[in-house]
Image: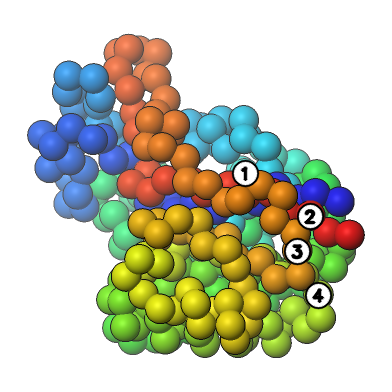
Amino acid sequence: MELHALTWNLFHGRDWPPEEQLQQRAHKGNWRRGPIRGDEYEQVNRDLSREFIAWIDAVEWDVALFQEFPPRWKARMEAAFGAQGHRAYSGRNWLQPLTSIIGQRRPDLLGAWEGGSNTTFARRGAGRIAERTRAVLTRRPELRVMALTRLESGICVANMHVSTKPASAERELLAAAERAIGFAGDRPLIFGGDFNVRPRDSEVFAELESRFGLAPFTAPDRLSHLLVRSLDVVEHPVAWPPEARDVADPETGLKIRLSDHNPVRGTFGLD
């Protein structure tokens, strides 16, 4: 059995054009709906669910781990992918569904304040979802959670987005690994998401491997990873280049760059 896994921080379903003059408009607080045009790119400040769905559906995957995932997208993506989803609400969801309504019309007005989640989808060869658990990693300075999902195949998936400060991120990753191993037991485990620390700058990846058997990291300079235990690495996790997440706007001919993070994909085998 081979399992294709994808992890991606969706930046709350927003775009992040590489041209500096456009990025200045892409921060929260922007009322203006786009497109604001640059030389090759545009910044749109509108709902991009159709573009994200089309991009994700074109990728070969059985399990997808998303962070900064707009909660309002779950049912739409389940239908589009023929998948089951496990949504674990993270921080800033206090004013739902009002913030979702605003976010659908002006996502850059609220940014992360629309609310978010770590959401895992399973389709095709992954099997159906048998168990869902939400684990709190920390509540301060911001709520950080992990979505723990067990598939009928026996494979377990831990999907997380930890804090941005390196010391906090390292503590949360080790706590998450301990909780995920406890959840999985003897079953195979995919441990992935936005780790917010790079292997070249942190010893936490060596500890994750030595203490918990979780490896390999994506690359020394990456923030997003797919570590595994009790699974063979068929295709090493690789971060796609920024240009890979560009989509064309048929009305303007300019490019839209989805998210501010690169997707990571790997293939794993189970005997």
Q: Residues within 10 Å of mark 3 (few under 14, many from 20)?
A: many
Marked residue nearer the N-terminal end (4 or 3): 4
Q: Vertical placement of 106 versus 215: above or below?
A: above
Between 204 and 171, the one lying in front of the other is 204
Residue type, numbered disc 2:
Gly
Dot 4 lies on which element? loop
| Numbered label attached to residue 77 | 1
| Numbered label attached to residue 143 | none
Marked residue nearer the N-terminal end (2 or 4): 4
Residue type, numbered disc 4:
Arg
Q: Residue at x 30, y 13 (%)?
A: 252
Viewer can see residue 236: yes
User: Is 262 placed left or right of 155 in the picture?
Assistant: left
Q: Which residue is mark 2?
A: 269
Residue 109 in percent (x, y) is at: 23, 50
Distance of label 2 from label 3 (alpha carbons): 6 Å
Q: Closer to the camera: disc 1 or disc 2?
A: 2
Q: Which residue is mark 4?
A: 187
Marked residue nearer the N-terminal end (4 or 1): 1
Dot 2 lies on which element? strand
Q: Which residue is mark 3?
A: 231
